[in-house]
Image (cartoon, grey):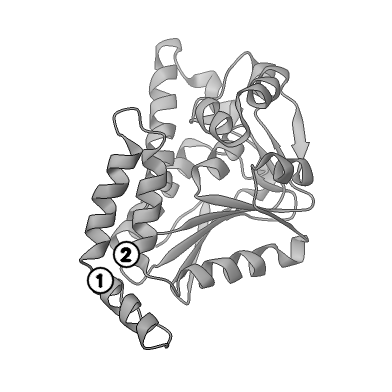
Amino acid sequence: MIFSTIKTELDNNILTITINRPDKLNALNQIVLDELNGAMETVYNEDIIKGVIITGEGEKAFVAGADISEFVSVKDDEGALLSQKGQEIFFKIENCPKPVIAAVNGFALGGGCELAMACHFRLASTNAKFGQPEVNLGLIPGYGGTQRLTMLVGKGKAMELMMTGSMIGADEAKDLGLVNYVESPENLIPKTKEILNMILTKSLVAVSKVIAAVNSFYEIDKDGFNEEVHLFGQVFISDDKKEGTTAFIEKRKPVFKGK
């Protein structure tokens, strides 16, 4: 995997994807989006990859937003296509059957906040800042921010943040449920890997169905309870279920094979 605007590193079945434009505070341009899409295709297709961390290069920013300089050249009638492209890529992250965790190491604004929210959950460094400041540009979030921020923090707070364009710090983000943990900058990646490694000791068949079941709660064309029944039926006949229940009865640790 060779890219120009992101870096990838595979270590112990965990792929770390680093947005690598520190001179632009890792702002998302079309090349970054295309390469992020390519990296996620690899995640879907390569069995050796069991989990993913998404973070930003440097100490200042996760992703400080979209690259606004590109918007100048976008034609008036192409705005919806731009939004649709970003949403499709972020849906690929959100619906990935393998766990994807955001390690937010600085500014996560606009498209950066949207990228973090598309991940299954988030850890933040103490210097992280979150926000959807698009109204300052006469815009609204376009990569799923209006929906995911509302899901995560509730309607009232989401409305406030998006209408004022205000930023919040890591501790407030944790209090609101936007992030799960706040860590020192030096401990952010180690803590993220610690949690991800714990997940990877579980049945990855079951983990993938947890992702699908929880996501179905937010899909208007699905009944989440019915989807849970369907997914429970799938895991019930898996080899991992047989191993897990047998190990429990035999009072030993299960050895899951992801089948």
Please tell me whether residue 146 is drawn above or below residue 229 in the rendered image.
above
Picture quadrant where residue 164 is located: top right
Q: Quadrant of the C terminus?
A: bottom left
Picture quadrant where residue 78 is located: top left
Residue drawn at the location 65% of the way across and 67% of the way down? 191
Please tell me whether residue 46 is drawn above or below residue 102 in the rendered image.
below
The location of residue 126, given as percent across then percent down, is 79, 53
The location of residue 194, given as percent across then percent down, is 60, 71
Q: Name the residue under label 2.
A: 205
Residue drawn at the location 42% of the way across and 45% of the way down? 214
* Front residue of 29 and 252: 252
User: Is disc 1 placed on a helix, strand or loop?
Assistant: loop
Numbered badge on residue 95: none
The location of residue 231, given as percent across then percent down, is 27, 52
Question: Can the viewer see residue 97?
Answer: no
The location of residue 33, given as percent across then percent down, is 45, 41
Q: Mark 1 points at which residue?
A: 259
Count of marks overlaid on the render: 2
Q: Which amino acid does label 1 sit on?
A: Lys
Picture quadrant where residue 87 is located: top left
Residue drawn at the location 65% of the way across and 28% of the way down? 132
- In the picture, measured across the screen, residue 98 lies left or right of residue 47, that is right
Sequence-first tag of 1 and 2:
2
Residue sticking out furthest to the left: 237
- In the picture, measured across the screen, residue 226 lies left or right of residue 4, that is left
Please tell me whether residue 135 is drawn above or below residue 231 in the rendered image.
above
Question: Can the viewer see residue 233?
Answer: yes
Q: Quadrant of the N terminus?
A: bottom left
Q: What residue type is labelled 2?
A: Val
- In the picture, measured across the screen, residue 156 lies left or right of residue 150, that is right
Tag 1–tag 2 contact (CB < 8 Å): yes
